[in-house]
């Protein structure tokens, strides 16, 4: 299997602290890679460096073999890389439907056609499908800010898929989501992974969620990669137990 | 604004438009001047509403763009150019300057941005006042002609009021189209969550610059109508207080609401006139009214309506839920 994303030697320093300290890994086409580690170990900083939200102090990021280090987030998104954030990031005053149309509109046409063309950028059906897929039908016209935390979390994830991404980086998608909704979310992620052949990297603290969802798991500690492997291998790794999982 | 029936909304809109066309026919010169001023200020406020209300970019320079448009129109029409050409130049000029003024917004936001735009406002005023070879300096430019529209002279107040009203109609339609388009959605994304917007492929730099440029261009349009309306301009009307007035129109009407600028301009232009019977007290009463409104409803007049409609929707939804619940209970 070919690598969608190749990360080599990424470093990020904040003053004297190196939050990410020479991380290298690759993400294979169609896999779901888990990323775990204690709080403050650099997972989110790594995401931000890959996605252009932060400029890495060193190292390279390649997408499909092409160097993309230093591209802006919007440019990366246009190349098919999408993400969710650790903290909720929806557009609270827009309706659920408008949030989803917004999430996909920049992938339709160009600046001119988005000004003079259809106001929904031709995405009403796609948004409706996505709303159905995430079981948000009854909330389609509600302002996103009025939804419960768990529902907003689902919307947040749904938005990441509107542009038809090849690679999605999810930052703690399960945080604050109740168990039944979590099962739903996992179902949806697996379905999109299989049907749309989307590749995922998932940061998560919920071990059960990670271990059952991911084909491989990478463990970080203090800005470095501690272990990488199949979930059952990683779970038994003494260093991982010491640093993160606990006895 | 859900909650009103669609036919009712259309009927209301048509009634307002018909009223704006028919009622002023009996107005005197001064009444028509005030109403024309309302139309012109509505256009400028709509521009600021685009920049500030929809795209969330604070600007204290909208008055400067009205000035740029006014001087462009005054200089061109007194040199024999037709007003439509002057309007096009005013749009192009204020669009370009607004685009450049947008660059600071890529680095600073909120009150820092307010200060940057405030400095620009002062700069523009100084250019109007000091570059007398171009602007006539403190003596200004007089004898600004009013245009002929399809062969009709608009020198008299009523025809020129219709020119202003027609321009307002065109601008209103264009803005309505813009905010419903994906661009409008992207502008709101800038306001609500620029970080998330970027990660969804929205080129926040380009949209921020566009929001400034388009909002400023509407300021230019307003200025290009203001010059032939007053037929004389000097630098004073375009100082910082015009920018603050326009800001107040947007906030009082309801920032980010389509109809906000119309209402805000109405209050800013007409209310002082209605309060004239109180003689010396009218400015004080006006100030108190504005303070009271903003304490009661920080989201402006349309914010009150919005809250009322939201409350009604919530009530309707909970009534539906109650019905559904009792059905469930009887089913068990």
Image (cartoon, coloured by chain):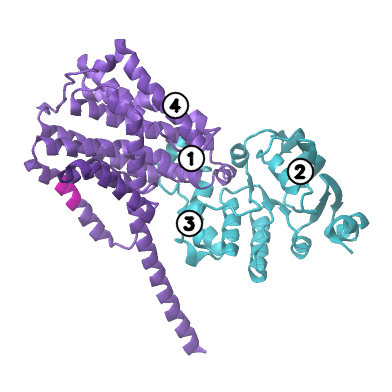
Specify the quadrant of the image occupied by residue A241. Answer: bottom right
Packing grade of label 4 (10 A; few <14, some 14-19, many >=20) is some
Left or right of B183, for residue B276: left
Chain letter, colour purple: B
Secondary element at image label 3: helix
Instruction: Give the Cα separation between the discs numbered 2 and 3.
Output: 34 Å
Q: Residue at x 28, y 39 (%)?
A: B42
Mark nearer the viewer, 2 or 3: 3
Instruction: Give the Cα separation between the discs numbered 1 and 3.
Output: 20 Å
**Mark identifier at residue A25:** none
Secondary element at image label 2: strand
The residue segment tinted magenta is B15-20
- In the rendered view, tell whether residue B161 sits above or below residue B328: above
Q: Is residue B199 visible?
A: yes
- Parent chain of label 3: A
Secondary element at image label 4: helix
Q: Residue at x 41, y 68 (%)?
A: B314
Specify the quadrant of the image occupied by residue B320. Answer: bottom left
Q: Is residue B259 visible?
A: no
**Mark identifier at residue B119:** 4
Which of disc 3 and disc 2 is earlier in sequence?
A: 2
Colour used to depict chain A in the structure image: cyan
Q: Are marks 2 and 1 on the same chain?
A: yes
Which of disc 1 and disc 2 is earlier in sequence?
A: 2
Q: Are marks 4 and 3 on the same chain?
A: no
Secondary element at image label 1: loop
**Mark identifier at residue A97:** 3
Mark nearer the viewer, 4 or 2: 4
Q: Check residue B19 for magenta coloring.
A: yes
- Parent chain of label 1: A
**Mark identifier at residue A3:** 2
Q: Are marks 4 and 1 in contact (CB under 8 Å)?
A: no
């Amino acid at each position: 299997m070919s690598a969608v994303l190749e990360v080599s030697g990424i470093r990020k320093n904040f003053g004297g602290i190196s939050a990410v300290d020479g991380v290298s890994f690759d993400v294979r086409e169609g896999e779901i890679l888990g990323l775990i580690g204690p709080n403050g170990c650099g997972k989110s900083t790594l995401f931000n460096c890959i996605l252009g939200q932060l400029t890495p102090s060193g190292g390279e990021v390649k997408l499909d073999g092409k160097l993309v280090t230093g591209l802006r987030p919007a440019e990366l998104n246009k190349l098919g890389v999408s993400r969710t954030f650790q903290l909720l990031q929806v557009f609270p005053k827009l309706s659920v439907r408008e949030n989803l149309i917004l999430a996909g509109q920049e992938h339709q046409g160009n600046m001119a056609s988005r000004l003079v063309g259809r106001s929904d950028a031709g995405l009403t059906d796609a948004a409706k499908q996505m709303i159905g897929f995430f079981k948000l039908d009854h909330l389609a016209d509600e302002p996103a800010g009025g939804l419960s935390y768990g529902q907003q979390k689902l919307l947040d994830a749904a938005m990441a898929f509107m542009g038809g991404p090849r690679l999605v980086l999810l930052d703690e998608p399960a945080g604050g989501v109740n168990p039944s909704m979590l099962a739903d979310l996992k179902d949806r992620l697996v379905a999109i992974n299989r049907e749309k052949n989307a590749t995922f990297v998932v940061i998560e603290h919920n071990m059960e969620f990670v271990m059952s969802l991911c084909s491989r798991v990478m463990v970080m500690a203090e800005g470095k990669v501690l272990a990488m492997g199949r979930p059952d291998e990683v779970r038994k790794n003494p260093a991982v137990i010491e640093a993160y999982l606990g006895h | 604004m859900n909650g009103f029936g669609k036919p009712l909304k259309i009927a209301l809109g048509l009634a307002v438009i018909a009223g704006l066309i028919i009622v002023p026919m009996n107005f005197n010169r001064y009444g028509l001047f005030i109403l024309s001023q309302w139309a012109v200020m509505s256009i400028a406020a709509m521009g600021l509403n685009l920049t500030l209300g929809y795209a969330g970019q604070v600007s204290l320079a909208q008055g400067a763009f009205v000035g740029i448009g006014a001087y462009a129109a005054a200089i061109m029409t007194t040199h024999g150019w037709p007003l439509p050409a002057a309007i096009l130049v005013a749009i192009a000029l204020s669009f370009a300057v607004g685009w450049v003024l947008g660059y600071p917004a890529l680095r600073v936001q909120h009150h820092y941005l307010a200060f940057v735009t405030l400095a620009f406002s002062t700069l523009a005023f100084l250019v109007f006042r000091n570059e007398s070879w171009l602007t006539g300096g403190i003596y200004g430019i007089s004898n600004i002609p009013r245009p002929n529209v399809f062969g009709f002279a608009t020198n008299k107040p009523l025809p020129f009021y219709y020119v202003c009203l027609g321009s307002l109609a065109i601008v209103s339609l264009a803005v309505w189209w813009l905010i419903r388009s994906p661009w409008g959605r992207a502008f709101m994304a800038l306001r609500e969550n620029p970080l998330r917007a970027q990660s969804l492929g929205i080129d926040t730099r380009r949209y921020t610059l566009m929001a400034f440029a388009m909002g400023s261009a509407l300021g230019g349009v307003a200025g290009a109508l203001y010059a032939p309306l007053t037929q004389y301009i000097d630098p004073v009307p375009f100082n910082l207080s015009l920018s603050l007035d326009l800001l107040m129109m947007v906030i009082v009407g309801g920032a980010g609401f389509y109809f906000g600028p119309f209402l805000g301009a109405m209050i800013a232009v007409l209310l002082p006139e209605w309060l004239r019977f109180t003689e010396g007290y009218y400015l004080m009463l006006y100030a108190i009214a504005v303070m009271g409104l903003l304490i009661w409803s920080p989201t402006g007049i349309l914010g009150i309506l919005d809250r009322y409609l939201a409350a009604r929707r919530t009530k309707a939804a909970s009534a539906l839920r109650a019905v559904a619940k009792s059905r469930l209970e009887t089913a068990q």
